[in-house]
Image (tube, grey):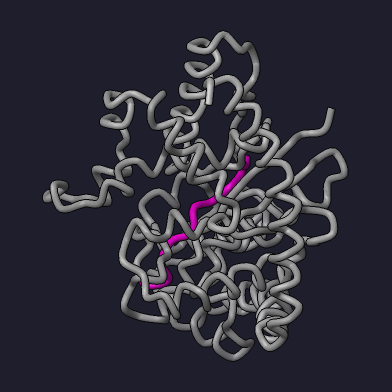
Amino acid sequence: MKKKIFSGVQPTGNLHLGNYLGAIKNFVDLNNDNQNECIFCVVDLHAITVNQNPKELKSNIHETIATFVASGIDPQKSIIFNQSQVSAHAEIAWILSCVARMGWLNRMTQFKEKAGKDKEKASIGLYSYPVLMAADILLYDSTHVPVGEDQKQHLELCRDIAQKFNNDFKVKDFFKVPEPLIKKEFSRIMSLKDGLKKMSKSEMSDFSRINLTDDKDQIINKIKKAKTDTLPLPSKIEELEKRPEAKNLIGIYSSLTNSTFQKSIDKFAGKNFSEFKDDLSDVVVDEISPISLKIKELLEDKVFLEKIVKDGHEKANEIASKKVKEIHKIMGF
């Protein structure tokens, strides 16, 4: 049995190394495995839970699709599409919101974090975001979903919604209950300026992150200026816990070389950061520079990008439409 894999990325623009190592690189591996059927969605409906400039949103959608393809996802092998172009996502989100319980959503920690102290001013869309995510996943009979730590709770909610729908309407296994795909030996990528903060496009300084559109010189310069401490690199993993910047840079190196933390530490133990940064720069440039060049090339070819979106939309819509017809029968519509 092939795994049916669904995952989505918000079109926020300026995708960076953290996005690549946390999600997109894994998508490429999943795409290349013949045991998988993959659907990768640009979740623009999720993006509008906060204010968006329409022109920027359209541009960011194109950039996200270009990044998928430039990174190695084959649109002939996997489905790449825009969430908003398949109306079933919004329709099934409404149906599932009538199945989900308020108590379940009230437990979602990500809403509390994003809404902050004044949650009365947060949009209803931000609150019900996980229900739309459940619709995204369940529409395609997904068996597995790649998730990071921040999305594990949302996938648990998706599983609860699927089971409740199946039980309420006495349709055993109608909605597949998806399993999480969690990367082993994955290092969370932090800011190059502060090893305690997640790498983010919203941070003021561009030197805090490596963008996937950065060229070779920009990458080398950013790594050279990345924050470190005055000690040589450690010989034991335990020593990294009190050295967040060192831990982050070794984590980046390990992720890009498909190595363990211990192997990377063994290689650089006792060396100074300038020597390590030279090797790290080479590794990052080798991985990211070709992607950067390809993204820029693809963004110049809007016709090709639109064709990918059109083909992906047709394939996704065909699958989703069949599921919607079955749901209508079950619901009595």
Residue 79 x, y percent position in the rendering: 74, 54
Considering only vertical position in the picture, is 215 above or below 175?
below
Residue 150 x, y percent position in the rendering: 42, 43
Query: Can you tell which quarter of the image residue 292 is in?
Result: bottom right
Q: Nearer the viewer, residue 17 or 332?
A: 332
Query: Can you tell which quarter of the image residue 217 is in?
Result: bottom right
Q: Nearer the viewer, residue 284 or 47?
A: 47
Q: Is residue 253 left or right of residue 305?
A: left
Visible residue check, residue 184: yes
User: In which quadrant will I find the N terminus?
Assistant: top right
Q: Magenta segment: does it hold 57? A: no
User: Magenta region: which residues?
Assistant: 183-193
Visible residue check, residue 230: no
Residue 204 x, y percent position in the rendering: 31, 78
- At horizontal 50% and vertical 19% (from top left) the residue drawn is 165
* Residue sitting at the far right: 34
Q: Is residue 24 left or right of residue 110?
A: right
- At horizontal 38% and vertical 62% (from top left) the residue drawn is 195
